[in-house]
Every structure is written in structure tokens, then in C-alpha cells.
Image (tube, rainbow, N blue to C red):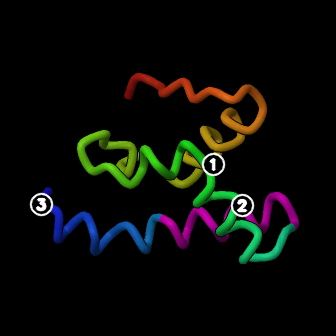
Amino acid sequence: MNQEQFAAIMPYISADLVEMIAKKKSISENDAITKLYNSELYAILEQEDTKVWQYSTDMLYSLLEQEEKTGEIEFPDV
């Protein structure tokens, strides 16, 4: 995938994840955005070559939860 295609899909991935964070944590969308953008997961997600963007929204949310609980992210073998 080239950088232009990646840049085009990232807003959709982020929006889905923000929506899930807001719903599951019962927080505002703005707080969910802040939580996501300040995470290590998002820093990794922004890099196309990590291929983390291919994970489902549920998987990304699970990884974010793991990061919050342990301070680390252990990526599954998929």
C-alpha cells in the first residue's frame, strides 16, 4: 500500500476505534480521541509498515486496553 492510500484509510480506522473507546469506556468522543492519540498503540498504528492498521477494531481496542493495564503491547501472531 502506498502512503497516499494509507493516509486515506487512517481516518476511518481512527474514527471506528474512537467510537468504540467512547462507547466502552462511557467517555466523550473528545476524551476518546485524546486517549487514542496519546497511546503508544496510535504511534505504532500511524506507521504503515507495522501493518497494525490491518487489525480489526476489536483487536485494536484490546491492544489499547492491554497497553493501559500493563504499559506494554504484545502483538498477536496473525
Q: Residues within 10 Å of mark 1 (few under 14, many from 20)?
A: many
Q: Residues within 10 Å of mark 3 (few under 14, many from 20)?
A: few
What residue is disc 1 on?
61
Q: In the rendering, at what x and y percent does residue 53 appear?
A: 38, 51
| 30 displayed left or right of 54 | right
Looking at the rendered structure, the number of numbered marks drawn on it comes to 3
On screen, residue 74 above or below 64: above
- Residue visible at 25% across and 64% down in the picture: 6
Label 1, secondary structure: give it: helix
The rendered magenta stretch, by its main secondary structure, is classed as helix
Magenta highlight on residue 22: yes
**CA gap, disc 1 and disc 2:** 7 Å
Identify the disc placed on residue 21.
2
Q: Quadrant of the N terminus?
A: bottom left
Q: Amino acid at mark 3?
A: Asn
Q: Residues within 10 Å of mark 2 (few under 14, many from 20)?
A: many
Nearer the observer: mark 3 or 1; the answer is 3
On screen, residue 72 above or below 43: above
Q: Amino acid at mark 1?
A: Tyr
Q: Quadrant of the C terminus?
A: top left
Task: Say if mark 1 contacts mark 2, CB within 8 Å.
Answer: yes
What residue is disc 3 on?
2
Snapshot quadrant of residue 37: bottom right
Stretch of the chain drawn in magenta: 14-26
Q: In the rendering, at what x and y percent does residue 38 appear?
A: 62, 55
**CA gap, disc 3 and disc 2:** 28 Å
Q: In the rendering, at what x and y percent does residue 56 appear?
A: 48, 50
- Residue visible at 54% across and 24% down in the picture: 74
